[in-house]
């Protein structure tokens, strides 16, 4: 699992993002006194005492630190807690695996200064240079290249929409789509072509400007005239299969299926398509009785620009309409009898399934499986940077894509539930921790050096624990402490405050 994950998001990616994060931290004034030029009453209330940031630590956004930071995001998903703060609790009863690796403050600093894009180029992202995916472009391109380097796309794929729940405001490359008929009513909107549960091509809708950007970059003027939905499917099909589009099979649901789209896929890419269809006056009229038995079907042929289509209405719990350029008449594709649940009789019964439905159920599962796996590792965290929602979607996609590639490489290990997706994610986290180590292990060494340095700086100022209790003289935190400097007579909570107080002596 770790080997495949490193192929999708290689070491060079983490080094590149680390460089972006360091530049972002410098621009935000990390490690400097942000209140130095301000009057006391105008200082930012977040910073206590002298109004300084925490002393800058390169480990926060180093390649190793960022890899461990993302690993803890997966650990938070695997070890769910009702409150985010519980992940960093040192209470032995909670047994937090995150707290064993990260302190709360260090983790927050990593999140605070993590930046997946080049902050120096953000001002150029306007006008003709506008890129709607600028703030997560790096991981998007790396993920796309990594997936296509690992798998050779098979002949069967599916197209559908997905996304990630988000209840905040849009902006920064994110648009919130509201659909009251879905369980998650407010979501980001992502269109994708997937196989085996692995996205081959995807596109986030971020408003009209994203459509204009993609149409200008990937579509001809003639394709743009066909409409936004058709032009999007054509460009994603081109990105997914490239020059290997001939003979491909693609499956769609009734939101996208049309005879004109199927005609374009056949003439432009020599591809065949199958999809469910909504009731339409342009399609043949088939006669049904008031009541029907499950498994019955009616079919006819439809024509568009001298191309023949199979149109079938299948009687399931309700009438399902299929349109296909792959299948001929049902006489040549008889189908199979399979067990299906009968809700009225409360038992399994044998139901006839024609070949077009069998192929549709098998082919359409690519996008559905991708959505399901994304849900299993969905990172839930409040943020004021909306672009991180789409960024985390790409990171989640890298994780479950590595799992799916693993299942294709070693199918015998996943037979009969021997190994699961949860096992793969757990082994990925353990492998990262084993090879890299935890942040706490590195911090302990730094703190020991800092503590020794503090005592050396104050060698003529011996410590004591007999002072009147109160707050730390430097940071004004930790009420009720009695330790401090005997010579100066002030309370000091730790080595950092000890050093800050004595460094001018």
Image (cartoon, rainbow, N blue to C red):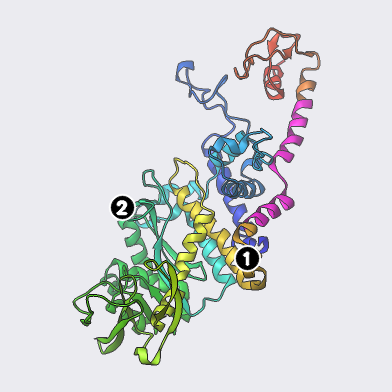
Does the magenta-highlighted stretch encompass residue 441?
Answer: yes
Q: Magenta segment, which residues?
A: 425-452
Q: Depth check: 228 or 190 in front?
A: 190
Residue at 35% across, 68% down:
232
Q: Residue beneath label 1, please? A: 417
Q: Answer yes or no: do the residues labelled 2 and 1 have beta carbons within 8 Å?
A: no
Q: Quadrant of the N terminus?
A: bottom right
Q: Is residue 490 left or right of residue 254?
A: right
Q: Is residue 234 visible?
A: yes
Residue at 53% across, 24% down:
47
Per the image, label 2 sits on a secondary structure element best described as loop
Circle nearer the N terminus (2, 1): 2
Q: Nearer the viewer, mark 2 or mark 1?
A: 1
Which numbered circle lies on residue 180? 2
Q: Quadrant of the C terminus?
A: top right
Q: Is residue 13 left or right of residue 197?
A: right
Q: Is residue 175 visible?
A: no
Assign the magenta stretch its main secondary structure: helix
Residue 374 lies, with reference to residue 276, above or below; the image says above
Residue at 50% across, 22% down:
37
| Residue 361 point in image, percent of width and height | 43, 74
Q: Residue furthest front?
A: 345
Q: Quadrant of residue 108?
A: top right
| Residue 219 point in image, percent of width and height | 35, 71
Per the image, label 1 sits on a secondary structure element best described as helix
């Amino acid at each position: 699992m770790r080997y495949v994950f490193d192929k999708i998001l290689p070491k060079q990616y983490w080094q590149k993002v680390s460089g972006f994060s360091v530049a972002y931290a410098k621009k935000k004034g990390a490690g400097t006194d942000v209140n130095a030029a301000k009057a006391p009453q105008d200082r930012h209330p977040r910073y206590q005492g002298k109004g300084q940031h925490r002393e800058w630590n390169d480990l926060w956004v180093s390649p190793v630190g960022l890899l461990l930071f993302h690993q803890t995001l997966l650990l938070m998903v695997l070890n769910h807690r009702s409150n985010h703060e519980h992940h960093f609790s040192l209470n032995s009863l909670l047994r937090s695996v995150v707290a064993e690796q990260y302190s709360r403050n260090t983790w927050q600093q990593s999140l605070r200064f993590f930046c997946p894009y080049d902050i120096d180029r953000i001002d150029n992202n306007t006008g003709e240079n506008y890129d709607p995916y600028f703030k997560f472009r790096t991981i998007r391109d790396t993920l796309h290249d990594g997936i296509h380097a690992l798998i050779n796309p098979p002949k069967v794929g599916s197209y559908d929409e997905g996304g990630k729940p988000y209840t905040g405001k849009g902006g920064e490359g994110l648009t919130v789509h509201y659909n009251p008929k879905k369980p998650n009513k407010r979501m980001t909107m992502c269109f994708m072509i997937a196989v085996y549960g692995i996205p081959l091509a995807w596109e986030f809708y971020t408003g009209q400007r994203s459509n204009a950007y993609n149409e200008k970059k990937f579509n001809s003027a003639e394709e743009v005239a066909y409409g936004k939905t058709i032009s999007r499917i054509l460009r994603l099909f081109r990105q997914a299969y490239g020059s290997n589009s001939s003979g491909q099979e693609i499956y769609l649901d009734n939101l996208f299926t049309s005879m004109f789209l199927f005609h374009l896929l056949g003439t432009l890419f020599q591809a065949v398509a199958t999809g469910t269809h909504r009731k339409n006056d342009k399609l043949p009229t088939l006669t049904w009785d008031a009541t029907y038995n499950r498994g019955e079907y009616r079919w006819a042929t439809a024509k568009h620009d001298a191309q023949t289509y199979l149109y079938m209405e299948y009687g399931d719990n309700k009438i399902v309409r299929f349109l296909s350029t792959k299948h001929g008449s049902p006489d040549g594709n008889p189908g199979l009898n399979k067990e299906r649940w009968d809700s009225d009789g409360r038992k399994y019964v044998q139901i006839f399934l024609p070949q077009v439905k069998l192929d549709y159920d098998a082919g359409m599962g690519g996008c559905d499986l991708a959505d399901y796996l994304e849900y299993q590792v969905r990172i839930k965290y409040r943020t004021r940077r909306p672009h991180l929602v789409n960024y985390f979607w790409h990171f989640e996609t890298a994780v479950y894509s590595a799992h799916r590639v693993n299942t294709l490489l070693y199918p015998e290990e996943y037979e009969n539930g021997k190994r699961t997706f949860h096992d793969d994610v757990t082994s990925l986290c353990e492998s990262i921790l084993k090879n890299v180590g935890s942040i706490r292990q590195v911090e302990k060494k730094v703190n020991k050096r800092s503590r020794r340095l503090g005592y050396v700086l104050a060698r003529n100022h011996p410590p004591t624990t007999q002072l009147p209790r109160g707050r730390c003289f430097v940071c004004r935190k930790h009420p009720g402490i009695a330790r401090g400097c005997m010579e100066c007579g002030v309370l000091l909570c730790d080595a950092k405050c000890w050093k800050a107080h004595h460094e001018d002596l």
